[in-house]
Image: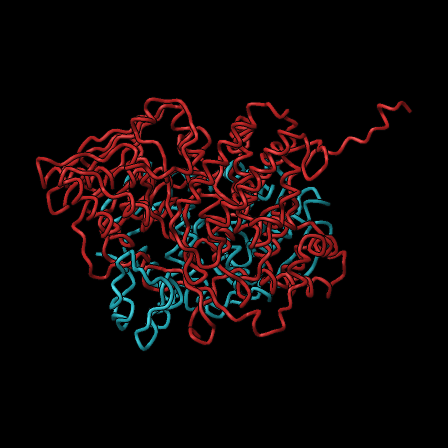
Chain colours: A cyan, B red
Amino acid sequence: MIKETAEMLRVMPREMRMMTERVLSLTSLPKGFVLAETDLVMYSQKLGLGGFALLERRFDAFRHADTASFTILSESAGSLRLDAAGQHAWWVIPTLLDLLGELCSRTERPTIAVENCFDPAELAVALALAARRGLAVEFADNTPPVLAATARPVSGSVVDDDPILRDLHENGTEIDAALWWRIYHLAQKALTPDSVVSRRHAGPLIVTEDGTVIGRKDNDDETDISFLVAPAPEHTREGAKS
Amino acid sequence: MSEALSVEVPAAPTQRPASMMMRPERLAAIQPSRISITRALMNRMMRERWDISTERFDVDAAGAGTVIYSIKAPAQEFSFIAFSHPPSRKARTGRIIGRAWDMMGTLNEGPASNADIEEARRELPKLYRGRATANALVWCRSNRSMRVFDETLAALASGRQPSIDDLADVCYLMRNTGLDGNGTFGTRSFPSLGPDHALGGPLQAQLLTAYLMREYSCDLVEHLAQLQSENAVRLDPAIRRYLGVGNGSALGLIFYVHRHPWMIHSWIEAREQAIALARSLKPAGNDPRIDRLMALLSRAIVFRRQDRMVYETFSSSDEVADGLEKIVQALSQWKETGKVAGAEPHFPLNAIAVHLEGAIPPEAIETYFSLLIELVPDEADRLSALIGGDDELSVTAGETVGSLSDLIQAQYQWALNTDMSVPEARRYIWYKSETAEEPRRGAREEVPEAIDLGLDLCGGVQELLRDLKSHDADLSVARFLMRHPAHRHLVARIQSLRDLAFHTPAANINSEDFTPIDLVRLMNVGIHGIDKTRDFLGRNLRGVLFHGAPTPDEIRAGGEHFWAYPAEPSQ
């Protein structure tokens, strides 16, 4: 087990995936892409690459990310050149793994050279994510960087096939506490500010503008009605006694 | 061909099809059973004679203090550390946005050390800013049902038992107001627990915690009564058993259903397979299993007749009881005559279901099926142990666009047939509030700033198929997704779930027609095993967990008996 210190936190996959999803939902990345790729930053963190610090540093640039801009420059005999259109390495990785997987079905050891990619060292995340997809990927940090793949057997159980994910589930990963809380607060922006109207969108009772209670009338849970109709406080994000 | 061979033998009943089972209204009708997690867990605790004991109960007359329980499974020990707080009426609500909790606690692996206790005391009140210790499985919170708790306390302190009339209106002393685990706040990640862990199955850690909340609520009211009066008495064991723990659930469970398709599939499949096995039985009329079934039905009828809850949209308990009585009549008639609806059935238990389907409320039919499972307990427990799954999606990049299109048209006709062109189809948006991350669902125009967190399966599948059709059928999914990255999640989901039957409810959750409570009910009633689930505004359920469950003394004594559907204790 990783020992916690005053400066470091042990964070778990569920939290990292949730924060990643929320932060990326604030960018131009499409929802369907974000939902499928919440592991990229977590693996980067676990592997000692840029991780959440890089996510924070690149956040403004990610507001203009475009994952539909990649093009295949050339392709022959299992060797492919991909133009990443200046996009970040994280957003190219899913396409690289897809193409390597497809090529592996008809070529013994396909390679892809990635041109025009931002933060190319982060392409190393692909090595870890490849395991669950039945691929063993090698990464040469050349100019341009090149990834090569061979097929590897999988059991069908993602946790068994992916040792990094298993380690993450068992031990989480360490992260600088101050960084984590900055990410947490950035992610909170993906949530919707509280309001009296919004409070009517959940719960067993609704308090209308004229004070009428709709729904649960017995108030058996002793709901403080004034709490439901009070104006939103300045800062309500923790919602707890902190 | 001989005469014997020419007799047509009906095929044994099989599991019901997904096209029927995955309709929201059918999922909503599923009733608690031996496959429900609370019942499966409690039955195993009884078989394995778990030892739950109080190690510390240090609470003052105002209700402030510390409580420690030890939970010993055969090969593992856990501890439940709870902090009791005097009730506050300010900012109190059953919703997770509440800020007043009468108890906060943690279920940990291993015995409670002083360091664990002090860490929990410091971190739990911070909640979203708190960090759990590495051995924490679940953080929890609960609130008293003030009226019932206070009446029970007053009765015990004055040397008498509480009135059943008062208790039966609610059936619990305290309500669960939050169970967080699986990595939340740094708790242990459940996929790491593994099959040999005593709480390694889905939802088991959370629901053991709920059981401990129930024990805590009974211990607390007895303790406070003793502090008030030397003449105080303890709860009658029958009343203590009758009391469960309250539970409120709502929109967040729709997110859970969509994020855990393997778990949903495996749970429904386990139940359907167990039902099919039971429907295939060919008992004689004097088979003792039939007597047992009739006794269980009678127990369920009494339970429903005594139910004092009022339901907004579901069948009333009297209607369900009427339906169950028709089943008992059909069983009795078959025992006497060998006939169901005038015919001699090959599979009589199945024939009764077929005969009464549509003639009695669906909750009654599903109660019958749940009770049939008790006739195949070993098979049901074996199937129950298989529930779970990784819930990780991945793309199969080498599949062709043509193959994926065929798959969608074969498996998602319900989504393709949904009319997404009308405004009502996209009326609602699903989002979470900044305040306590409460899941909410509202008209889009009322929260224009909200980011949509819902899974738009119908719209997404229709757009995906349209885009797939715009490409050559031989194109690989890898190259399709390079051009259409927005479809990535849906493609991974559809490909990953292709071999499962029961993974996704056939519902457009953004639509005016969708009733969220249907899927909340699947989770609460069917999967969790919660009784007396009152519904509010089509989106909230309040019910009773572990209603009638054995006490720790009974668990420690071992053996296994049917404890659900408790009758009101007599006074």
Give the farthest residue toward the right: B1
Work out whether residue A122 can be spotted: no
Work out whether residue B73 can be spotted: yes
Name the residue located 49 percent from the left edge and 38 percent from the top edge.
B33
Task: Look at the image and tell me in which quarter the N terminus of chain B lies.
Answer: top right
Image height check: is B185 above or below B112? below
- Total numbered badges shown on the rendered structure: 0
For the residue pair A123 and B279, the one nearer the viewer reads as B279
In the picture, measured across the screen, residue B199 lies left or right of residue B480, that is left
Image height check: is B429 above or below B57? below
Image height check: is A22 above or below B336? below
For the residue pair B96 and B218, the one nearer the viewer reads as B218
Task: Look at the image and tell me in which quarter the C terminus of chain B lies.
Answer: top left
Q: State which quadrant residue B414 falls in.
A: bottom right
In the picture, measured across the screen, residue B177 lies left or right of residue B249, that is left
Rendering coords of residue A142 (x, y %): 54, 52
For the residue pair B430 and B122, the one nearer the viewer reads as B430
Q: State which quadrant residue B233 falls in.
A: top left
Rendering coords of residue B298 (x, y %): 48, 36
Rendering coords of residue B130 (x, y %): 26, 50
Name the residue located 36 percent from the left edge and 73 percent from the top edge.
A197
In the picture, measured across the screen, residue B166 lies left or right of residue B452, that is left
Name the residue located 18 percent from the left edge and 42 percent from the top edge.
B155
Rendering coords of residue B99 (x, y %): 24, 58
For the residue pair B163 and B551, the one nearer the viewer reads as B163
